[in-house]
Amino acid sequence: MISAALAREAGHQIFALSIDYNQRHQVELAAARRIARALGAVRHVVLPIDLSAFGGSALTAEIDVPKDGVGGDIPVTYVPARNTVFLSLALAWAEAAGARSLYIGVNALDYSGYPDCRPEFIAGFERLAELATKAGVDGEAFRIHAPLQHMTKADIVREGTRLGLDLGLSWSCYDPTPAGTHCGLCDSCRIRHKGFEDAAIADPTIYAVTPPAP
């Protein structure tokens, strides 16, 4: 959401891509549709690609989402190569559409330790885009923008507020309740809530339980 808003602020038109990878938290796709409308996206594509066929993650297989806080290891909510898959699809659309700037909302500070959120990954993918596309071979460089990468969650909340966004439209939870609320206990809920607390900005999120510290 905030990454897309920053793209708009930089003068870009928004072509939004969401991936329906048969994730546990399908509610995030409804949130993505609301956000795309709110930001005035020229087009919003929801592309189905069923990563549950591979499994290997609590988000795509019958594995419990951890609820005991952020640990030191890469958690089971990591989806194998997810951001590589997502950026590859975004790159394909960008090349077809004649776009050369791709924005992704990864963060490498207040996060769960996913390897495909790191600066090294973004830099490596940008190099791949140069090598793997006709546009790149023709000298038309792609730029992978990750404007939130070095921000704390509090910084991100403040930035969203500066941009005038309704942060209640966004979604973070990995294990939504049957009522469609944030669970309050998964890593993502805990990190989200702490970001609002640290920013001293009211959290508009509805949680099943108030998130404890990460």
Image: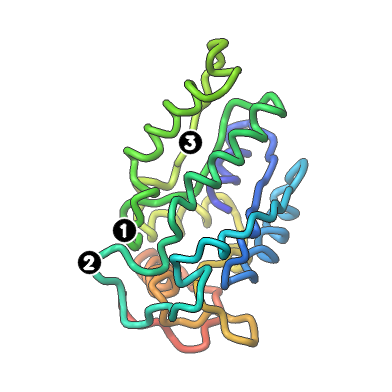
* Depth check, front residue: 2 or 82: 82
Q: Amino acid at mark 1?
A: Gly
- What residue type is disc 3 on? His
Q: How far apart are the two marked residues, 2 and 3, measured between alpha carbons?
A: 27 Å
Rounded to the nearest angstrom, the CA distance separating label 2 from label 1 is 8 Å
Q: Residue furthest front?
A: 53
Of discs 1 and 3, which sits in the foreground?
A: 1
Q: Which residue is mark 3?
A: 145
What residue is pinned by disc 1? 113
Question: Which quadrant of the figure has residue 32?
Answer: bottom right
| Residue 96 percent coordinates (x, y) | 70, 28
189 left or right, relative to 110: right
Q: Which residue is mark 2?
A: 72
Q: Which mark is residue 95?
A: none
Are dots 2 and 1 in contact, CB under 8 Å? yes
- Depth check: 75 or 183 in front? 75
Q: Residue at x 72, y 55 (%)?
A: 38
Helix, strand or loop at mark 3: strand
Q: Could you classify mark 3 by the number of other residues whose Cα lies within 10 Å: few (under 14), some (14-19), or many (20 or more)?
A: some
Residue at image coords 59%, 34%: 91
Instruction: Name the spot of residue 205 as percent of width and height, x first.
Output: 54, 75
User: Looking at the picture, does residue 139 appear above or below residue 198?
Assistant: above
